[in-house]
Image (cartoon, helix red, strand yellow):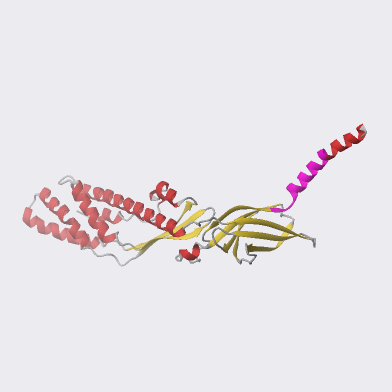
Amino acid sequence: MSKKLKKRLIWIPSILIPILLLIFFLSPSISIETVGNGVFEKEQNTSNFQKSNKMYFVTVSEKNLEDYSTEKISLVDDKNQEITIQKKDWASASKTVLWFYGKPHSNYKLTYHIQKKNDTDQTVLRKTFSTADKPSNLEDVNQIVEKKVKDESNKKIKDSILNKTKEMSKSINVYYTPTQTELESIQQAYTETFITDLSGYKVHMDTATSDGYSFTVTSKWSEPDINDLNRRIDERENQLKQEVGHDYTQLYKRIIDELPNLIRQTPKTTTIKENKSIFKVGRIDPKAIEKNYHFSELNLLDDDFGDPISNILL
């Protein structure tokens, strides 16, 4: 073989490889990013988690499709049965999320039929993917988040009520300073009467996607009628003055001692206040949510349920 021919043969790969790589990187293609089960919108029946656990999503990364129109997207299972795509979401300019009812531990084939703009030639892109052996249990996630939100919110509310009770009692400190036990008795009476049975207090999973879980927390409550409570406190003070005279230490000690029962007898106002807040949780293992997530700083409930205590007049 001549030296010239050898040189030519050596140059061929060095020219062809960059060309082939260029064709590869510029050619239209699709790839699978994430596959999971979830909920795509609030209107979907998330109260029926058995049904929701069968809803799957696949995130498709699309490359070099700017000059193409997508004529059809189809999905078939491992028996070549067509699967209805329930919804298409555009996560970004180059990512599409497809939702479908599927099964765990199953194989699927995704097909894109694309056509170059201002052309009649069509191209077919195919990718296969599999669902996990065991889907995420959305009901478990919902129950864990609901319990944590309620527990942490209740603690935050109780702490606020106790702090407001301490502030409220400062007006009589010159005569009598309530003990911690007495303050906690007032807090407990207020909590049991006006907080424990918040109407419609619930946490609801709205969506579960590759990005995470979205929830809405709602509550309804009626404030205590503090005017009614103040009137009865004033009446009781006048009665006690007949018994203890100007012994204000004894007077306010008796008032503080009786205040929990006075609170329990206080009616609610007729105005119903509603709270609604939306928050998100990352798509992580339910046990990690239970261990690592804290919701008390999210200010999920707009109202400070302890505020009415500040208006109690001693």
Tell me: 10 left or right of 59: right
Kindly tell me whether residue 92 is visible in this rendering.
no
Q: Residue at x 64, y 63 (%)?
A: 75
Q: Residue at x 64, y 56 (%)?
A: 128
Kindly tell me whether residue 76 is visible in this rendering.
yes
Of all residues shown, which one is farthest toward the front?
1
Of residues 296 and 176, the one nearer the viewer is: 296
Tell me: 133 left or right of 116: left
Q: Residue at x 66, y 56 (%)?
A: 127
**Is 114 located above or below residue 179 in the figure?**
below
**Is 291 located above or below residue 301 in the figure?**
above
Question: What secondary structure do most residues of the magenta stretch adopt?
Answer: helix
Of residues 41 and 16, the one nearer the viewer is: 16
Is 272 included in the stretch rendered in magenta?
Answer: no
Q: How many marks?
A: 0
Residue 214 image position (x, y, % from top left): 48, 56
Answer with the quarter of the image where residue 117 lies: bottom right
Of residues 108 and 307, the one nearer the viewer is: 108
Give the quadrant of the N terminus.
top right
Answer with the quarter of the image where residue 201 lies: bottom left
Of residues 126 and 89, the one nearer the viewer is: 126
Q: Residue at x 13, y 57 (%)?
A: 237
Is 16 included in the stretch rendered in magenta?
Answer: yes
Residue 153 image position (x, y, % from top left): 35, 53
Residue 227 image position (x, y, % from top left): 24, 61
Chain part drawn in magenta: 13-29
Residue 145 image position (x, y, % from top left): 41, 55
Of all residues shown, which one is farthest toward the top?
3
Tell me: 297 left or right of 196: right
